[in-house]
């Protein structure tokens, strides 16, 4: 556990790897800072990787990344093409598009993004997007635990029936 001074402790069981990809390095730094502040307030550990070159991100797509913040309008490879490649390699990753092009929101649905954040409304929309991500991860964790318990329960019932015969 890592201490937070008087604020309490980080929840080491909740640890998330996040990637930001945008061709505007100033925006990357701003978004990264806001994400980090939000996670610190929630006392959750996050590791953020930043990419201003979409090709470099494509070379480093990993199964351990849970959340990607992708700009749509980037040179060479746009955010939607990147999302397609990420989801092909890791279908359990979540995508949040961050763009000045809100007219692209409907086209983005093809990639099933968790959220679409408009850059000019980032301060209003980011916290809700992070909450949606964390809620989804919590529900996924509960589902996995319930599934394991159900398998264990069925297995125990089968053993009990065999013992009765």
Image (spheres, rainbow, N blue to C red):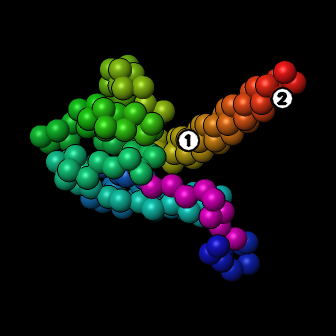
Residue farthest to the right, as pictured? 164
**Callouts 2 and 1 close, C-beta under 8 Å:** no
Residue 136 in view (yes/no): yes
Q: Position of residue 70 (x, y in %)?
A: 33, 42
* Most frequent secondary structure within the magenta stretch: strand
Which numbered marker is on residue 133? 1
Image: 119 above or below 12: above
Query: Quadrant location of residue 14?
Result: bottom right
Q: Is residue 135 above or below residue 1?
A: above
Q: Quadrant of residue 51?
A: bottom left
Image quadrant assignment for residue 68: top left
Spot occupied by residue 125 in the image (x, y as percentages of width and height) = 53, 41
In magenta segment, residue 16: yes
- The reply, left or right, for residue 70 in relation to residue 142 is left
Q: Residue at x 64, y 73 (%)?
A: 1
Relative depth, front residue between 112 and 31: 112
Query: What's drawn in magenta, residue-wise?
Result: 9-17
State left or right for residue 34 relative to residue 83: right
Q: Is residue 97 visible?
A: no
Q: Residue at x 55, y 58 (%)?
A: 15
Residue 91: mark: none
For the residue carrying disc 1, how many other residues have a C-alpha within 10 Å: few (<14), some (14-19), or many (20+)?
some
Label 2's element?
A: helix
Q: Which residue is mark 2?
A: 163
Nearer to us: label 2 or label 1: 2
Residue shown at the point (26%, 52%) measured from the top left: 60
For disc 2, the neighbor class at 10 Å (few under 14, some 14 to 19, many from 20) is few
Give the vertical position of 154 relative to 68 (above or below). Answer: above
For the C terminus, the quadrant is top right
Residue 39 on image: x %, y %? 57, 58
Is residue 103 toward the left or the right of residue 47 in the image?
Answer: left
């Amino acid at each position: 556990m890592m201490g937070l001074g008087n604020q309490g402790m980080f929840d080491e069981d909740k640890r998330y790897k996040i990637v930001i990809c945008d061709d505007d390095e100033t925006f990357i730094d701003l978004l990264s800072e806001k994400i980090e502040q939000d996670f610190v307030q929630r006392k959750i550990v996050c590791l953020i990787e930043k990419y201003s070159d979409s090709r470099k991100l494509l070379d480093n797509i990993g199964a351990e990344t849970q959340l990607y913040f992708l700009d749509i309008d980037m040179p060479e490879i746009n955010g939607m093409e990147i999302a397609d490649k990420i989801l092909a390699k890791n279908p359990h990753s979540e995508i949040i598009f961050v763009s000045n092009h809100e007219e692209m929101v409907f086209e983005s649905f093809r990639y099933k993004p968790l959220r679409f954040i408009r850059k000019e409304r980032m301060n209003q929309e980011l916290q809700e997007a992070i909450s949606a991500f964390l809620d989804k991860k919590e529900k996924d964790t509960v589902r996995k635990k319930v599934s394991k318990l159900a398998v264990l329960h069925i297995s125990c019932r089968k053993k009990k029936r065999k013992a009765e015969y």
